[in-house]
Each structure stands twice: as C-alpha cells, then as structure tokens.
Amino acid sequence: MKKVLYLFATIALFASCKGGTSTDGTAAKTDSAARKDSLPMPYKASYSSSFAISDNAKNEQLVLQSYKDWEDNTLKNGSAYLGDTVTMDFANGKHLTVPRDGIIKEWQNFRDSLSSVKLNIVAVTNLHSTDKNSDWVGVWYVETDTYKTGKVDSAFYQDDNNVKNGKMVYISSKRRPLRPLKKM
C-alpha cells in the first residue's frame, strides 16, 4: 500500500503540473497514452500511472470540509463525508481500518489535546485514475497546532484522500516539520 501512496503523490505532483489552459480558457487535452508508448519507462507502476485531472468538484469539497471540521473542532460532522469504514495511515506511522465512528473518535481524542488549529491550504489536486476508476484528492497544507499546554507546533502535510461513492474511504498523511530558514 505504501508503494501506491508514494506513486500517487508523485503522480499528483506531475499531473498538477501537466495540465494547462488553451487560449479559449478550456483545459488543454493531452494524449498521455501516446506519450507513454513513445518512451520506455524504467518502472511499471503497481497501482496506476493513468491519472487525469478530475472536474468532480464534490469530491474536492467534501475532502476540504473534513479539513475545515478539523480546524473548527466540529468532527461530529464526519458522517457527511466519511465512508462506513475508513482506512487511515497517520503521519506518525499508525495504521487503522475502523468504522467511521472509530476514526472520528481517534481524531477527536487528539483534537481534544489542542486549544486551536490553523490550516493554510497550499494546493489541492483532484484526480481520477482512469484505469482503476478511482478518485483521489491530494491536499498539501501547513498546520499550526496550539496545544492546551501552550506548546505550538507547525508542520507541512501532504495527504492523499481516496473518495468512493461520495465518501472518503482511505486517507494517507505524510508530515514534514517546518524548519527555520538558514541564513546563507
């Protein structure tokens, strides 16, 4: 599963850069299959390498609503966007596959240790795997947590959210601590 996640993160990065806009304002179309056939690839993706930018705004909206609920501490709204069962790979390495109420409880337990959360959404990629018929929303963001103890912690996150039948069913979160810039 980790291979799939790393692959998705890489694909999301490149897919977000490949898209363009034509002179009439519509999305530029590319024939990725023809390009791939013309170049030998050093690896074959174990999950998929056929992604297209998705225009399904509902997927993006429901994923971003989950982030807003995290920030606002209104996790009880989770039934609106989480599947009956959710699998999550946390940034700390913890892996869970639990019913919706279990993931909400897990989130709430951690959120209760915080007095505030501030999110700065940096980028969102809304992708569709054409060969797997699977929808993914990638979110890159900076999160600043203020703990009830007064400790403040900020980090950069990259999350991959799999949406199936209008609900989030898989979430993978990667975290990189923010470091002060070094003077040169």
Image: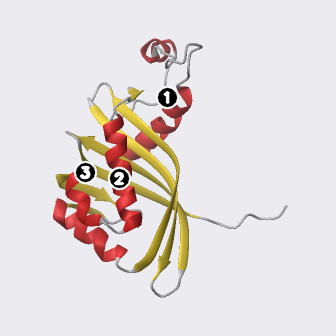
Q: Mark 1 points at which residue?
A: 42
Residue at the outermost right position: 184
Q: Residue at x 31, y 38 (%)?
A: 58
Q: Which corner quadrant holds the C terminus?
A: bottom right
Q: Which amino acid does label 2 sit on?
A: Gln
Q: Name the residue under label 2.
A: 65
Distance Cα–Cα, label 1 vs label 2: 38 Å
Distance Cα–Cα, label 2 vs label 3: 8 Å
Q: Do the residues labelled 1 and 3 touch (CB within 8 Å)?
A: no
Circle 3 SS class: loop
Q: Name the residue under label 3.
A: 81
| In the image, residue 167 above or below residue 42 | below
Q: Earlier in the sequence, mark 1 or mark 2?
A: 1
| In the image, residue 161 above or below residue 79 | above
Q: Which of marks 2 and 3 is nearer the N terminus?
A: 2
Determine the image quadrant of residue 23.
Answer: top right
Residue 32 in picture, x, y percent from top left:
46, 18
Determine the image quadrant of residue 56.
Answer: top left
- Whether residue 73 can be seen here: yes
Q: Which residue is drawn at 51% across and 54% down?
A: 141
For this rendering, which residue is in front, 38 or 34?
34
Q: Are marks 2 and 3 in contact (CB under 8 Å)?
A: yes
